[in-house]
Amino acid sequence: MSWDLASGSRLALRTTRREQRETVWRLLLGKLKPKRGSLSYAPRVLHQGDEEIWKRARPEASLEDNLHSRLFEVRPWWKSKRHDQVALMHQLELPVSVRKLPLRSLKPEMSARALMLLMICAKAHVFVLRQIPGVEDPMTQQVFSGWFHSFSGALLLLDPPERWWRVCDTTCVLDSSGTAFPLNTS
């Protein structure tokens, strides 16, 4: 299987087995080496996974403190314009009290919004998403949609809900033998 992910491209990969999904995830993030072939990213291309951002964040620190890391942009792009982090916090309806709490003490809805903010602010060129953040939260979904359509890098979605794989440039299905087939989404 071979893909060239150019800036702005969106690829959905649908797997037929849970093990496939885990294997592909680990391969794409460099946690597993391919048995045959190779996996490479262009030099100086930063690739990131949604769960990796959350794992790298310091759980004892607040969202604001985590955003001071050099891993994040101070004025990231969202909806084709630069926004400062505070404006994005307002957009996600993250109250000041929540921004100052340790990440580990956030309730699920606020955790999803915090993850979405970390994703928007991350200095990454390729994002591998194992799940769409805040599926139950309309606010997070609205912000994710704006980010999905305006993120300048490449997005690779693993087993996204139909709503999302239908708007990707390319959707492939990985069959039970491990062969990828393009899926006609029109």
Image: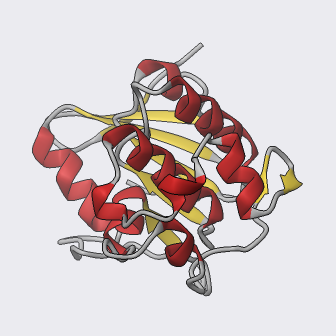
Image x and y of residue 35, in percent: 17, 72
Colour option used: secondary structure
On the rendered image, what quadrant is the C terminus found in?
Answer: top right
Q: Nearer the viewer, residue 176 or 139?
A: 139
On the rendered image, what quadrant is the N terminus found in?
Answer: bottom left
Q: Nearer the viewer, residue 106 or 76?
A: 106
Image x and y of residue 167, in percent: 61, 26
Q: Quadrant of residue 158?
A: top left
Residue drawn at 44 percent across, 56 percent down: 128
Residue 42 to residue 138: above or below:
below
Residue 12 to residue 165: above or below:
below
Which residue is most to the front?
97
Residue drawn at 63 percent across, 29 percent down: 142
Q: Quadrant of residue 147?
A: top right
Q: Quadrant of residue 117?
A: bottom right
Is residue 169 visible in the rendered image? The answer is no
Is residue 87 visible in the rendered image? The answer is yes
Image x and y of residue 116, in percent: 53, 50
Residue 71 to residue 178: above or below:
below
Q: For the image shown, how many numbered marks are present on the structure?
A: 0
Which residue is most to the top?
186
Residue 62 to residue 150: above or below:
below
Image x and y of residue 99, in percent: 53, 59
Residue drawn at 36 percent across, 63 percent down: 103
Q: Nearer the viewer, residue 143 or 2?
A: 143
Residue drawn at 29 percent across, 57 percent down: 105
